[in-house]
Amino acid sequence: ASQLLKILSVQRLMQQDSDMFESNMQACNELFRVWDDEVRQFKELVREQLKKRGNFERPPLKINCEHTHLQERIVDLQKFRKQHMKLQEVIEKVLAEGKESSAKAEVVAAYRLVENVDVLDVSRRGGQEWEATKKRYEERIDHAESEITARL
């Protein structure tokens, strides 16, 4: 997980264009799939070894993997980006093209909040900062949505 963090930390994920972001996310998801498969195989191996020794009880194999928190954050980032991209598409369709509005500017400003936080910090403090940033983002988006609703 630490190696993956080193690689991803220089990528500036939230500032990447959608194609690059998706490519990076697919690579991460594939890596997580491999790790999950390896953990599953390890658990099966331990169970087999216990059976060979005559212990037929199912061992309570709770393995705390180092990558779990990062994997959860990556999934959250993917959902967040997907929702943001959908919102941008809707705003572009609803508001006349080429016409600037404070709603468009508000959405851009809201996303800048996310660009300025370390989204890969999965520590307790990093999690709190990410959640607080998402909340501030939502507040700005609510403001933009209110403007759009008023126009319609």
Image (cartoon, helix red, strand yellow):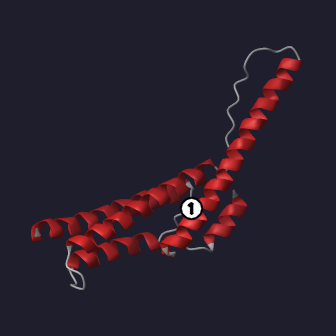
Instruction: Using residue 17 as the reference point, say whether residue 102 is left or right of it.
Output: left
Density class for disc 1 (Cα within 10 Å; few <14, some 14-19, many ≥20) is some
Residue at 78% across / 36% down in the picture? 42
Residue at 56% across / 72% down in the picture? 20
Q: Where is residue 75 in the image (x, y as percent from the top left)?
A: 52, 54
Name the secondary structure under disc 1: loop
Q: Where is residue 60 in the image (x, y as percent from the top left)?
A: 69, 25
Q: Is residue 128 positioned above or below 50 on the image?
A: below
Comparing 36 with 111, the one in front is: 36
Instruction: Using residue 91 as the reference point, say whether residue 44 is left or right of it.
Output: right
Say which quarter of the image contains residue 136: bottom left
Say which quarter of the image contains residue 146: bottom left
Comparing 93 with 112, the one in front is: 93
Comparing 90 with 135, the one in front is: 90
Quarter occupied by the C terminus = bottom left
Comparing 110 with 136, the one in front is: 110
Residue at 21% across / 84% down in the picture? 99
Q: Is residue 104 positioned above or below 55 on the image?
A: below
How many numbered circles does the render carry? 1
Q: Where is residue 149 in the image (x, y as percent from the top left)?
A: 14, 65
Q: Position of residue 96 (x, y in %)?
A: 19, 79
Residue at 59% across / 60% down in the picture? 26
Which amino acid does the dot numbered 1 rest on? Answer: Asp
Residue denoted by label 1: 121
